[in-house]
Amino acid sequence: MNAIECKNLTKTFQSEEKGKQGEVIAAVDNISFAVEEKGIYALLGRNGAGKTTLLNMLCTKYIPNEGEVLLFGEPAYENEKQLKNICFMSDDMPAFDGFKVKKILAYAKAFYESFDHELCRRLLTLYEVKEETLYSALSKGRQTALSMIIGLCSNCGIVLFDEIYSGLDAVARQQFYEILMEQQEKNPRTYILSTHLIEEMSGLFTDVIIIDSGKLILTSSMEDLRSKAFKCTGREEAGEILSGKNILDIKRMGPMAQYLVYDELSVEDKEKLLFNHVTVEAMTLQELFVAVTGRVMEE
């Protein structure tokens, strides 16, 4: 069973930008995809791509103008059972303002019936988050850590993290990655993590979702990406060998060119490329992201 299924999701807002007030903008534009159980999904997109809006619809904070969200096969909206099985945490939680950490955790423990109290105590100590402190008095890093702690300890079947790691320093982020993998091994769940730290976090992900300007650009398992995303570098004649392949971008360097390819390359294809002195390397996830959301390919 899929943990999440999105069907033709669309969410529009009225622009508040000067000179465009009242103009209708589609933050999420007719998106459909499925998220399997017990995977760690990267949600990638440039600023303003629609990532946060999409996550807010998955947890029903936003109601779509069109389309449907299913959680474990059931409609998400007005479904108390499934809403208690999904946890959404971001790096900005204004609802926490005015409360002490102790009170925020009490609400979380009451709402999430399987909340992991032992892990919570361990993480509060690790990240030096004091329960008697007001949320607004915490540093940005500790506010971020609290959101991360609640998400990990909620024991929900689906956990959504929207850039919560951006407020953590490098050591704290590495601790988070290790704890996430430890918990996923002990108690596999479905995670969707939006992030700009693509290269740093790429080793965590089982699957990738890329959106741009509110539209779905690509969904794939990391395993499939590793078998289809290549950099082919050689003389420009290499383009003839790659004719018919899905070329995302071409970077020319004098008589040489680098072809960013998202397609199957057979053993015969690779042998022919190597015979013609064309090197074939795997693209990193960040390179693929830039290729599918960056500049228009040269003519």
Image (cartoon, helix red, strand yellow):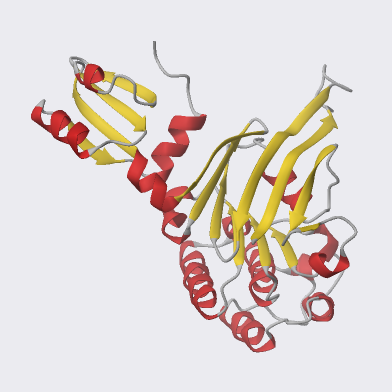
Task: Say if 62 sits above or below 39 in the image.
Answer: above
Task: Say if 211 sits above or below 295 in the image.
Answer: below
Q: Quadrant of the N terminus?
A: bottom right
The percent coordinates of residue 296 (x first, y second) are 47, 19
The percent coordinates of residue 284 (x first, y second) are 36, 44
Q: Residue furthest top?
A: 299
Using the image as rendered, state which of residue 72 and residue 88 is in the foreground. Answer: 72
The percent coordinates of residue 101 (x first, y second) are 77, 76
Q: Is residue 192 left or right of residue 248?
A: right
Residue at position x 83%, y 27% in the image: 15
Taking the image as drawn, is residue 139 in sight?
Answer: no
Taking the image as drawn, is residue 153 in sight?
Answer: yes
Q: Is residue 157 left or right of residue 67?
A: left
Q: Quadrant of residue 49?
A: top right
Using the image as rendered, state which of residue 145 and residue 141 is in the foreground. Answer: 145
Q: Quadrant of residue 217?
A: top right
Task: Say if 158 sits above or below 272 in the image.
Answer: below
The percent coordinates of residue 42 (x first, y second) are 54, 52
